[in-house]
Amino acid sequence: MGFGVGIAVSLNQADSWATSLWHGSVAAYVSAILMRWWGRAWRRNLEQALQEREDTPTPLLPSTTSPKARS
């Protein structure tokens, strides 16, 4: 994805093929670093949410009264 975007932007600016290839390579590298960072952050937050869900106690019996009757 990053490679294609880098090539497209470079060609849109009427750069040479060598420059476009260079820009595509740099864009691919940068997008890979960003996707790696984003994936780790997403996974860490997902694991934290699952841990919080496991740590939250669940009631033994569900409430039989309506929310309006409790207030």
Image: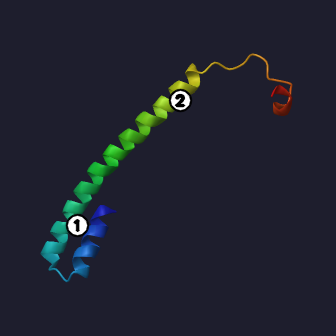
Quadrant showing the C terminus: top right
Say few, some or many: other residues with alpha carbon within 10 Å of mark 1 (under 14 / 14 to 19 / 20 or more). many
Q: Residue at x 25, y 68 (%)?
A: 6
What residue does disc 1 label? 24
Q: Residue at x 43, y 37 (%)?
A: 43
Q: Residues within 10 Å of mark 2 (few under 14, many from 20)?
A: few
Which mark is in front, 2 or 1? 2
Residue annotated with mark 2 = 50
Identify which residue is drawn at 81% across, 32% down. Answer: 67
The quarter of the displayed image where residue 36 is located? top left
Tell me where residue 20 appears, x and y as whole percent.
19, 73
Task: Give the vertical position of 22 relative to 45 (above or below).
Answer: below
Camera-side residue: 23 or 68?
A: 68
Secondary element under disc 2, as helix, strand or loop, is helix
Q: Please, what is the three-letter code of the amino acid marked with disc 2?
A: Leu
Residue 35 numbered tag: none
Q: Is residue 30 above or below residue 21?
A: above
Q: Quadrant of the N terminus?
A: bottom left
- Residue at image point 79% right, 18% down: 61
Question: Distance from label 2 to label 1 (Cα)?
Answer: 38 Å
| SS at mark 1 in the image | helix
> Residue 24: x, y in percent?
22, 66
Instruction: Decide if residue 12 is on the left or right side of residue 40.
Output: left
Residue 55 image point, x, y percent: 56, 20
